[in-house]
Image (cartoon, grey):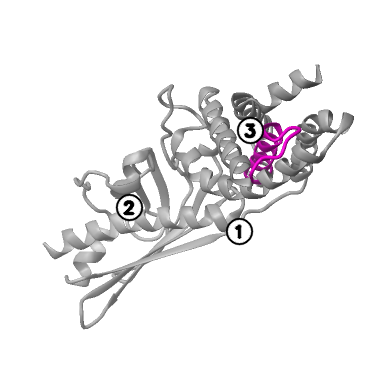
Amino acid sequence: MAKRIHRVFQNLAFAILVPGLAGALLVWLAVKGVDSYGLALFYLIPLIVSILSAFFFSYGRTVKYREAYGVALLGELATGAFVMVFALDGLVCLLMAYPLAAVIGLGGAAIGRAMGSSLTGRVKNVAPILLVGSFPFLLGAEVAVKYEAPVREVETRVMVKAPIEDVWGLVIAFPKIEEEPTGVFRFGIAYPIEAAIEGEGVGAVRYCRFSTGDFVEPITKWEAPTHLAFDVVENPCPMEEFSIYGDIEAPHLHGHMVSEKGEFRLRETEEGVELVGRTWYRHSLRPQFYWGAISDQLIHQIHERVLNHIKVEAEK
């Protein structure tokens, strides 16, 4: 009987698929159960999956670390595949999360390999259950601690060789961007299309239309032709997810990445008009150092699409 258990656990498919399925169930608990996109989701689940994969693969035997790590990576990939099958998230977000999971898997593979080759007796058989069973408590502890996401600021600059009054007019409302989306925008990330305004001066409402809907932006500062500032009271979805089921409504598409305000500043120089766009926003995905770097870059590319369009139109 013991030999049969050894053979089952050491089976490569078992070491990949069972931890992958367990990981997907934990993802479901985090995102559907408590709507949490924190450290438990992005740290603990990859760690648990990589430990389990390496543990099963090295169960009762000694394997090389690179082999254990390879199986751990495949276990994490299986988690992503099950997440897509269960319609918990789409391909783009999974691809963005995988580099972080792969790094965490370095430690998980080492732990699982050590456990599989050294643990004996009953502890060895119940270790996977204890590992998975600890997750709901750790997730609950994280949710119980209220987390306020920091405000992040992104700034982008371009130089426009045109009269400042012409640039100002396009900042307020710019015509439709006919250029097809490029780069990350081809993979579902929301991108700007055009902007319109109702009214003039403080209290007017600007509408910046994106591929997923409109940002609604009441004007808070109107200092023509040098400074336009606004709050953001409505945010569309930040992206459209790619899924085997077509469009899916992943929880992180609503309320987890929110723009709060923005501004444009214009300054005349000897080279032309320096046009600066800024956005202040929050997102609740953690770790901030990882997801913040990604979201900052995405917003910077959104800025570039708008500012370069204004530049082209003004210089005509």
The reply to whether residue 286 is visible in this rendering is yes
Badge 2 crowding class, 10 Å Cα cut-off, few under 14, some 14 to 19, many 20 or more, is few
Q: CA distance from mark 3 to mark 2?
A: 46 Å
Q: CA distance from mark 1 to mark 3?
A: 24 Å
Residue 46 is a magenta residue: yes
Q: Magenta region: which residues?
A: 41-64
**Res. 35 image quadrant:** top right
Instruction: Give whichever of discs 3 and 2 has the lower sequence position.
Output: 3
* Residue wearing tag 3: 27
Disc number placed over residue 150 in the picture, else none:
1
Badge 3 crowding class, 10 Å Cα cut-off, few under 14, some 14 to 19, many 20 or more, is many
Which residue occupies 71% across, 36% down?
55
Badge 1 crowding class, 10 Å Cα cut-off, few under 14, some 14 to 19, many 20 or more, is few
- Name the secondary structure under disc 3: helix
Q: Which residue is most to the top?
A: 1
> Whole-percent x and y of residue 99?
52, 48
191 above or below 248?
below
> Whole-percent x and y of residue 315?
14, 65
Q: CA distance from mark 2 to mark 1?
A: 32 Å
234 above or below 81?
below
Q: Which residue is most to the left?
A: 316
Which residue occupies 70% across, 31% down?
56
Which part of the image, by quadrant, shows the N terminus? top right
Q: Nearer the viewer, mark 3 or mark 2?
A: 3
Q: Residue 134 or 124: which is nearer the viewer?
A: 124
